[in-house]
Image (tube, grey):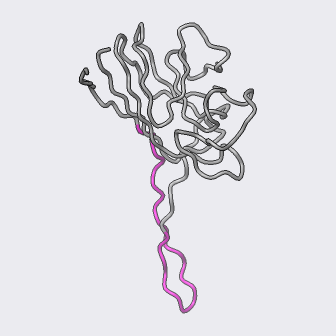
């Protein structure tokens, strides 16, 4: 049995908005001033795909692990992570990739941040696949960028990323 010899990881972490400084409240008569800690606002972005790696190497296996949380993709649903909503049925035409659950983290190798391809409209040289929390991608013919999106979101502004970390490792096939 061969021993896996993974190199890496290379890590992408979603940039966070600047922390909001606690502001003292004006004291009421007979009360003391209080400081209130506020959470930073969620990061809002535009476009459909978020670039997480400039170039993945050619001729190597690629292992990808993801973690994170996003909100407001579907009304009245709680926060979701990379594996998506396993109990939610959505018409396939509303998803980027019909074979993956709504809300799942998707990967795209090649293309650009502005591509509007879906699973049934693949462009030449572009690979579209579900990442979830873990996946392995077969060796690429040529180096290409890695982008991520959330299945069911038509743009990155359709939901709020609370956190996102994507790591990848490479190995000889």
Q: Quadrant of the C terminus?
A: top left
Q: How many numbered marks appear?
A: 0
Q: Is residue 33 magenta?
A: yes
Q: Is residue 70 above or below residue 28?
A: above
* Residue at 29% in and 15% down: 172
Determine the image quadrant of residue 149: top right
Range of magenta residues: 13-36
* Residue 121: percent from left, percent from top: 67, 14
Q: Is residue 121 magenta?
A: no
Q: Quadrant of the N terminus?
A: top left
* Residue 96: percent from left, percent from top: 65, 26
Which residue of the protein is positioned furthest toward the front in this rendering?
A: 1
Q: Is residue 145 left or right of residue 114?
A: left
Foreground: 159 or 136? 136
Foreground: 34 or 29? 34
Q: Is residue 128 above or below residue 38?
A: above
Determine the image quadrant of residue 29: bottom right
Q: Is residue 42 above or below residue 171?
A: below
* Residue 109: percent from left, percent from top: 49, 18
* Residue 82: percent from left, percent from top: 52, 39
* Residue at 33% in and 27% down: 169
* Residue at 54% in and 28% down: 130
* Residue at 44% in and 29% down: 135
Q: Is residue 107 left or right of residue 89?
A: left
Report the predominant secondary structure element of the magenta stretch. loop
């Amino acid at each position: 049995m061969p021993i896996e010899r993974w190199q890496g990881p290379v890590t992408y972490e979603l940039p966070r908005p600047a922390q909001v400084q606690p502001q003292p409240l004006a004291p009421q008569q007979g009360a003391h001033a209080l400081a209130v800690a506020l959470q930073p606002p969620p990061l809002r972005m535009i476009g459909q795909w978020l670039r997480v790696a400039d170039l993945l190497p050619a001729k190597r296996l690629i292992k990808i692990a993801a973690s994170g949380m996003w909100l407001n993709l579907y009304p009245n649903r709680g926060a979701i992570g990379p594996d998506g909503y396993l109990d939610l049925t959505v018409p396939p035409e509303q998803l980027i990739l019909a074979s993956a659950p709504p809300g799942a983290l998707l990967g795209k190798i090649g293309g650009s941040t502005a591509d509007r391809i879906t699973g049934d409209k693949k462009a030449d040289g572009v690979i579209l696949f579900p990442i979830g929390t873990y996946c392995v991608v077969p060796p690429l013919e040529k180096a290409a960028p890695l982008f991520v999106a959330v299945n069911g979101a038509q743009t990155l502004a359709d939901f709020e990323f609370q956190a996102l970390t994507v790591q990848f490792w490479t190995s000889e096939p």
